[in-house]
Image (cartoon, grey):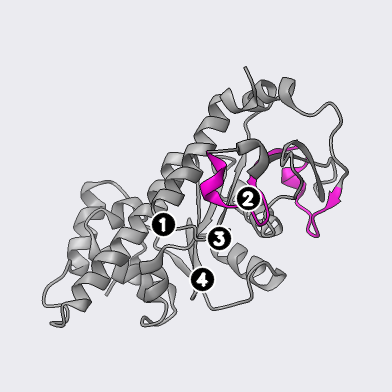
Amino acid sequence: MSMTNIEVIQNYIRACDDGWLQGWHERNGGNLTYRLTTKEVVQCRPFMNAQAGEWVDIGVKADNLAGEYFLSTGSGKYFRNVILAPQDNICLVEISAQGDAYRIVWGLEKGGRPTSEFPTHFMNHSVRKTATDGAARVIYHAHPANLIALTYVLPLTSRDFSRVLWKSATECPVVFPGGVGVVPWMVPGGSEIALATCELMKEFEAAVWSHHGLFVSGNDFDLTFGLMHTIEKAAQIYVLAMSMGQGIRQTIEDDDLRAIARDFSVTIREEFLD
């Protein structure tokens, strides 16, 4: 038995590999973090390092994440290598009692640190924990090509993106009835994009990073990966339809979206409908 045999670690590794196989993680692109349950921490504790790493200041503080444990991909590490050598490419970190620092308690055995966007993930975990009464545990950032392509041709508004995606596939208003938020282009990894994303994640489960990628949150790996996958497939359908050169002749109308929401007992964001 080892750390990598534990179910939560296995599920995390699978999520990383699934994203790689979709083509969403060129080179060292993208990152994935997960907030462990108390039970999972107990399962992992016997395999944590006898001597934890030094405390590292996160640069932001979240009182509601004090003492929590997170799985994270490593900075500069490749998603394609996670399944081959998880102990070298991912890590488990403990958050300080003050909620403002982390230390590595397992993983990255050949050196390194959590993803460079850990502060952004950390801030958004705090926001989503509050917004979902603790249910949301996963934050996932990837580079799905069709969704990124849409940021070059659609108006960069949450309403425009949500409407195009909803109307591209019938399942979309069921999977993300609240729509998606849109962040204008910003330098990745900085405080500006972190704060802008936090504001959107107070009300959205997904935020489009213009000309960059997609940032999503969910309660577990299946829901989070499924959200990313659904949004990217809807974007691909729209790209394919527009590439046929005829324009959009027919689509799912706004009253159809309302009917879907009614029959599947979800609340669609009415202000995004005509």
* Front: mark 4 or 2: 4
Q: In the image shown, does 90 or 137 lie closer to the viewer? A: 90
Please rate how many residues cluster around mark 3, counting C-alpha atoms within 10 Å: few if below 14, some from 14 to 19, many from 20.
Answer: some
Quadrant of the frame with the N terminus: top right
Sequence-wise, the earlier of marks 3 and 1 is 1
Per the rendered image, the range of residues in magenta is 56-83
Is the C-beta separation of discs 4 and 2 under 8 Å? no
Please rate how many residues cluster around mark 1, counting C-alpha atoms within 10 Å: few if below 14, some from 14 to 19, many from 20.
Answer: some
* Front: mark 1 or 2: 1
Secondary element at tag 3: loop
Sequence-wise, the earlier of marks 4 and 2 is 2
55 above or below 36? below
* Front: mark 2 or 3: 3
Q: Which residue is tagged 3?
A: 29
Q: Amino acid at mark 1?
A: Gly
Q: Which residue is tagged 2?
A: 125
Quadrant of the frame with the C terminus: bottom left
Sequence-wise, the earlier of marks 2 and 3 is 3
Specify whether residue 53 is painted magenta.
no
Sequence-wise, the earlier of marks 3 and 4 is 3
Sequence-wise, the earlier of marks 1 and 2 is 1
Q: Which residue is tagged 4?
A: 212
In this rendering, would 196 be left or right of 258? Answer: right
